[in-house]
Amino acid sequence: MFLSCSGQFATVHVSLFCRGWIMLHKTCSLTSGSVRWLSVRLAAFLGLVLSHPAGGGSGGWRAIGHEPSWSIMRTDTQLTLETDFGATRRDFPLPPAGRIDEQTVSYSSSAKGSKLQMTVKQAVCIDSMTGMPRPDQVTVQIDERSLSGCGGDPASLLQRNEWKVVYLAGKAILADPIISVNFSSEGRVSGSASCNRFGAGYTLTGEGLNIEKGMSSMMACDPPIMEQEQEFLQLLEKAVRFSITPAGSLMLQTAGQDAIELVKM
């Protein structure tokens, strides 16, 4: 990351490089009250980037939180807690996980006079800064300090099921044929669009979802089915974020607030 400033809280030039790519380039004017906001947004962005290792490697499980900013990484051997925007780092040996219930585990460890207690619950957690859903609700107690945030890979929420569409922009779809959607761990989304099979690439960015323009087979079906298929593919390509409802439905949302609602197959 490269961040250069000119003037006293006047013009700020921000360039964010990740693995050789320019992820953010911005020139803007800031007041003193905006500096903290920018720092928090960059910390949130980096938290998501760092939780997705290059090439899909097993970089460990990660959780992040905001206000105050913190993150914790769990590897096969240790827990690494960073606070104060990364200024303070503490490593703890990874203890055996204690099972609290079917969805919740806890970890207790100590090192260099500090005691750490972490609880991880398998339940959808919405990142308070970016709005990105993650699969785990996390609380950390470090000495007398309590922290809360979200953990796990957001992509796992997309990949854990094969989905079928039930609503397009608030309208129920035809009873037959079904529209199916599958998100792979290789960054591909595919399925049946109604009449034809489709496929496209997808990525998760710092704050949203991007689905590339894809390809589909060229079969012809009855006009109502073809119209539904076209509407689905257009909405899918326009999706910019996703959410999971309390009932477990997947919502793929466009910038215009239209949505594709999907349920487990």
Image: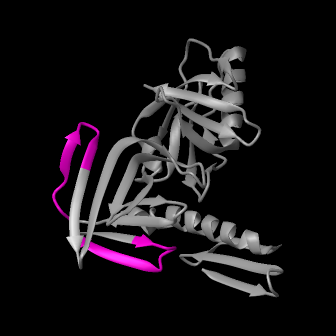
Q: Is residue 144 above or below residue 230?
A: below
> In this orientation, which residue lies closer to the viewer: 209 or 186?
209
Q: Is residue 246 above or below residue 85?
A: above
Q: Position of residue 228 (x, y in %)?
A: 68, 22
Residue drawn at 55 percent across, 17 percent down: 177
For residue 128, say whether it is visible. Answer: yes
Q: Is residue 131 above or below residue 58?
A: above
* Residue 205 located left or right of residue 226: left
Q: Position of residue 107 (x, y in %)?
A: 23, 57
Q: Quadrant of the N terminus?
A: bottom right
In the picture as drawn, the residue positioned furthest to the top comes out as 175
In the picture as drawn, the residue positioned furthest to the left comes out as 96
* Location of residue 54 (image quadrant): bottom left
* Residue 95 located left or right of residue 161: left
Q: Quadrant of the C terminus?
A: top left
Residue range highlighted in magenta: 82-105
For residue 60, say whether it is visible. Answer: no
> In this orientation, which residue lies closer to the viewer: 119 or 203?
119
> In this orientation, which residue lies closer to the viewer: 140 or 43?
140
Residue drawn at 51 percent across, 29 percent down: 249
Residue 201 sits inside the magenta stretch: no
* Location of residue 23 (image quadrant): bottom right
In the picture as drawn, the residue positioned furthest to the front comes out as 144
* Location of residue 122 (image quadrant): top left
* Residue 47 located left or right of residue 226: left
> How many discs appear?
0
Residue 104 sits inside the magenta stretch: yes
Q: Position of residue 201 (x, y in %)?
A: 56, 50
> In this orientation, which residue lies closer to the viewer: 172 or 214?
172
